[in-house]
Image: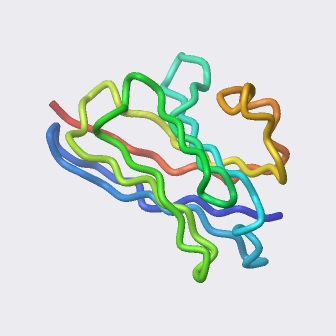
């Protein structure tokens, strides 16, 4: 599965962006999707998770209430709507996919088999 993440950019604090994660094979509807991010000099961290059937969504505490993960199965696209952005949200954002993530492991990036190339989000203060 080849993933593409896009939609990043430069935004002022308090602004919003919507990231998209797509698959050229248009099979994303069959996969669990996780969004992760990596800031300069820091380790990759979990952001949000969406079960393939929409049955479960989870968020990191740092983004809860500001970010929303959703899926358009017809377009084979998973979105990450990011509102009320903060400078600390600055990072490269990646989407990962796996056919079935054990729910207790959704925040563990190592369980995802497929990754996109990442898209840079920069939030200025």
Front-most of 36 and 92? 36
Tell how many labels. 0
In the rendered structure, the answer to whether residue 109 lies left or right of residue 73 reads right
Front-most of 103 and 27? 103
Residue 27 place in picture, x, y as percent: 77, 73
At x 26%, y 38%, the residue is 123
* Vertical order, 45 against 51 (above or below): above
At x 73%, y 78%, the residue is 26
At x 28%, y 49%, the residue is 10
* Vertical order, 101 against 17 (above or below): above
* Vertical order, 71 against 42 (above or below): below
Q: How is the image coloured?
A: rainbow
Quadrant location of the C terminus in the rendered image? top left
In the rendered structure, the answer to whether residue 108 lies left or right of residue 74 reads right
Residue 119 place in picture, x, y as percent: 51, 51
In the rendered structure, the answer to whether residue 5 lies left or right of residue 18 reads right
Front-most of 74 and 46? 74
At x 58%, y 42%, the residue is 49
Residue 5 place in picture, x, y as percent: 57, 59
* Vertical order, 78 against 43 (above or below): below
Task: Return the residue found at the far bottom.
Answer: 74
Residue 63 place in picture, x, y as percent: 37, 31
Quadrant location of the N terminus in the rendered image? bottom right
């Amino acid at each position: 599965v080849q993933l593409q993440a896009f939609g990043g950019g430069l935004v002022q604090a308090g602004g919003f962006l919507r990231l998209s994660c797509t698959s050229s094979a248009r099979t994303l509807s069959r996969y669990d999707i996780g969004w992760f991010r990596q800031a300069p000099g820091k380790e990759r961290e979990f952001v949000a998770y969406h079960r393939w059937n929409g049955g479960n969504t989870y968020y990191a505490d740092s983004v809860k209430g500001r970010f929303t993960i959703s899926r358009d199965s017809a377009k084979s696209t998973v979105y990450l709507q990011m509102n009320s952005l903060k400078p600390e949200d600055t990072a490269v954002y990646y989407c990962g996919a796996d056919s079935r993530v054990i729910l207790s492991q959704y925040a563990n990036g190592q369980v995802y088999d497929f990754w996109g190339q990442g898209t840079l989000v920069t939030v200025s203060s």
